[in-house]
Amino acid sequence: MRVLVTGGAGFLGSHLCERFISEGDEVIAMDNLLTGDVRNFAHLQDNPRFSFIQHDVSRFIEVDGELDAILHFASPASPIDYLNYPIQTLKVGALGTHNTLGLAKQKNARYLLASTSEIYGDPLVHPQPETYVGNVDTIGPRGVYDEAKRFAESMVMAYHRTHDLDTRIVRIFNTYGPRMRLDDGRVVPNFIGQALRGQELTIYGDGSQTRSFQYVDDLIEGVYRLLHADYHLPVNIGNPSEMSILQFAQFVNEITENAAGITYVDERIKGDPQTRQPDIARARELLGWQPRVDLEHGLQRTIDYFRELV
């Protein structure tokens, strides 16, 4: 295949480029480098089947030649990024999705949107199935990301129904692994960075809020299978093994042998969901997919990567 990956210099996008290259496909990575980094795909740049276009997908997109698939992964994805770049986040979710869908229509290419568990907001249903419509604060600070992705899903389904475009939607739950930025504000790099520096791990609130963490290799496998499946409605890809943030902090301290302990900040971040756990029955049934990498092994690989950065 000849594949376009937007956000190809990002954490997830670069792993996705790597997967397609390993499958023998030709890959075009596109990124404006607002939050991405070309070092994430430096090991691919000498490969004749890989190329990079620096471009903002919120502006008109032109790609020479045929395309078999477009995977739209461009977007700030961590709270610190989409709070710093709220308008860019909304534009890449709206204009970027529109432009990439238009390109897919022009090229008659299969299209996959990277959506997010954040479309569920602070959920009132637990665990979250794809049929749950969510509980989102549209005007809160996190709404710029949540609503951008919700709009993007609506746009994808409109193109599918109106133009019979061959589309897919993946709802990605908390994912971690090598190539995350140490300063991106998400809990995994925050905790690992603090632990490797011998600092106390900072918990917002009492630590009772829950998350479920999947290793990046599991996510990429799920996305790859979904692209090749004949299914057009959203599919959750995440690890249903749920734990509290306090439990996670204790585990990080244990695995890094950090004796500094934990400190608490009274207020939780506004809009921070209390619970997060995917219902992955649809992925199991449709894709034969479930996470394979356990937390200890995934975290150890991630810690080894971050040791070089701290």
Image (tube, helix red, strand yellow):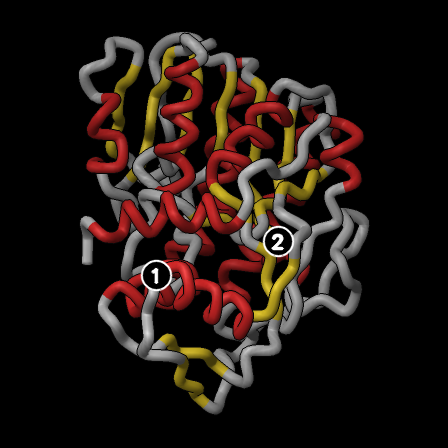
Give the number of marks.
2
Q: Which of the labelled discs sits on residue 50, or is there none?
A: none
CA separation in Å, label 2 and label 1: 28 Å
Q: Residue at x 33, y 31 (%)?
A: 30
Q: Is residue 237 above or below residue 192?
A: above
Q: Amino acid at mark 1?
A: Thr
Q: Name which residue lies at 34% across and 61% down.
A: 256
Whether residues under marks 2 and 1 lie with C-beta atoms below 8 angstroms apart, the answer is no
Classify residue 7 as left or right of residue 90: left
| Residue displayed at 45% across by 45% down | 298
Instruction: Please give the label number shown on residue 256.
Output: 1
Quadrant of the rendered structure where residue 227 is?
A: top right
Using a 10 Å C-alpha cutoff, classify the residue at mark 1 as few (fewer than 14 neighbours), some (14 to 19) or many (20 or more): some
The vertical placement of 120 against 109, above or below, is below
SS state under label 2: helix
Dividing the picture into quadrants, the one containing residue 39 is top left
In depth, the one of 244 and 128 nearer the eye is 244
Task: Examine the image and state in which quarter residue 247 appears.
Answer: bottom right
Residue 147, image x, y percentages = 58, 58
Task: Give the label, 2 or 1, closer to the camera.
Answer: 1
Q: Look at the numbered disc 1 and give the secondary structure of its residue.
A: helix
The mark that comes first in sequence, 2 or 1, is: 2
Camera-side residue: 94 or 260?
Answer: 260
Query: Relative to residue 49, is residue 279 drawn left or right?
Result: right
Task: Give me the disc on residue 117.
Answer: 2
Q: Amino acid at mark 2?
A: Ser
The single residue placed furthest to the bottom in the displayed view is: 266
**Position above or below: 10 against 289:** below
Q: Is residue 145 left or right of residue 302?
A: right
